[in-house]
Image: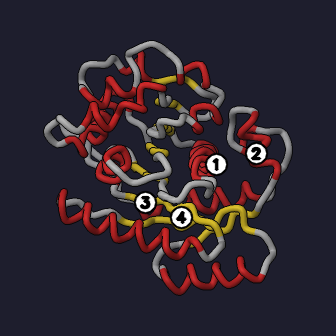
Amino acid sequence: MAGSARLCVTNQKGGVGKTTVAINLAGALNERGQDVLFVDLDPQGNATEGLGLLEAYDAEPPTILDALVDPGAVDHDDLVYDHPEMDVIASNVDMNAAHSALVPLDDAEMQLDALLSSLEQSRGYDTIIVDCPPQLGLITDNALCATENLVIPALAESTSKRSLELLFDYVGSLEMDHDVQIEPVALVANRVEHTNQATAMLEWFDQALPDVPLFEIRKRVALQRAFEAGSSVFAVEEDVDMQAEFKTMADTIETRVQRHEVPA
């Protein structure tokens, strides 16, 4: 049985608006009528805050960390929070201890995969979006191995060249170590402004990754207002021109992503 389309939104370079892209992509998929699960793996909990669930960050166990350490030990009703646009597995302050808690486990990089498979069986999501911390390591390894589909936010500035090179080198090593195939399904140039540097970088993105769809998200205050309101731009009353770009992104990704198989 075909399961969810799984997406990992990551870039180890901080400050690229990764969480904003993840939340609004989830909102666009919800607009398409999809049942979306959003997983916040970032120990800082930025997406949890941006979805209006800050109280979950300080909640008592069981938390996402408990579910990662033992995917079958936590009732899904205790783990999944309701949001008008999507279901959410919130981050928690306990995630700051995730690395030390996961390292001793066999197949430490595959704990999230087991958890998502269990959720697919019980809840049948159309798409699962995983928002990663802004660094590479065991938490991000779990997201990459579990989803195998990569959405990459990047700024239209020269520092993005090096960060993308490092990311793809890292992904290549992970593929060899864990016998997975991780495909980039979207490159999102975020906070784009009308500058010569931005124009040059958009051309470089096209040349460096010609087979990966490129999307341009212009710098808009409305995106921050939606974040502060605990939603995507699709749930605010004002019209935002970037809604169209996120909808196109959602449509394109839907055609490129293979769904995971749910065990019988």
Q: Which residue is mark 4?
A: 252
The amino acid type of the residue labelled 1 equals Thr
Callout 3–callout 1 Cβ contact below 8 Å: no
Dot 2 or dot 3: first in sequence order is: 3
Quick check: 100 left or right of 234?
left
> Label 2 crowding class (10 Å Cα cut-off): few <14, some 14-19, many 20+?
some
Q: CA distance from mark 1 to mark 4?
A: 19 Å
Q: Which residue is mark 1?
A: 20
Q: Is residue 234 above or below residue 82?
A: below
Of badges 2 and 3, the one in the foreground is: 2
Callout 2–callout 1 Cβ contact below 8 Å: yes
Callout 2–callout 3 Cβ contact below 8 Å: no
Dot 3 or dot 1: first in sequence order is: 1
- The label shown at residue 224 is 2
> Label 3 crowding class (10 Å Cα cut-off): few <14, some 14-19, many 20+?
many
Dot 1 or dot 4: first in sequence order is: 1
Q: Residue furthest right?
A: 238
The amino acid type of the residue labelled 4 equals Thr
Q: Position of residue 101 (x, y in %)?
A: 27, 31
Q: Position of residue 123 (x, y in %)?
A: 38, 29
Q: Is residue 152 above or below residue 29?
A: below
Of badges 2 and 4, the one in the foreground is: 2
Q: CA distance from mark 4 to mark 3?
A: 13 Å
Quick check: 208 left or right of 178?
right
Q: In front here: 32 or 130?
A: 130
Q: Residue furthest top?
A: 60
Identify the residue at horizontal 57%, vertical 49% (top origin). 22
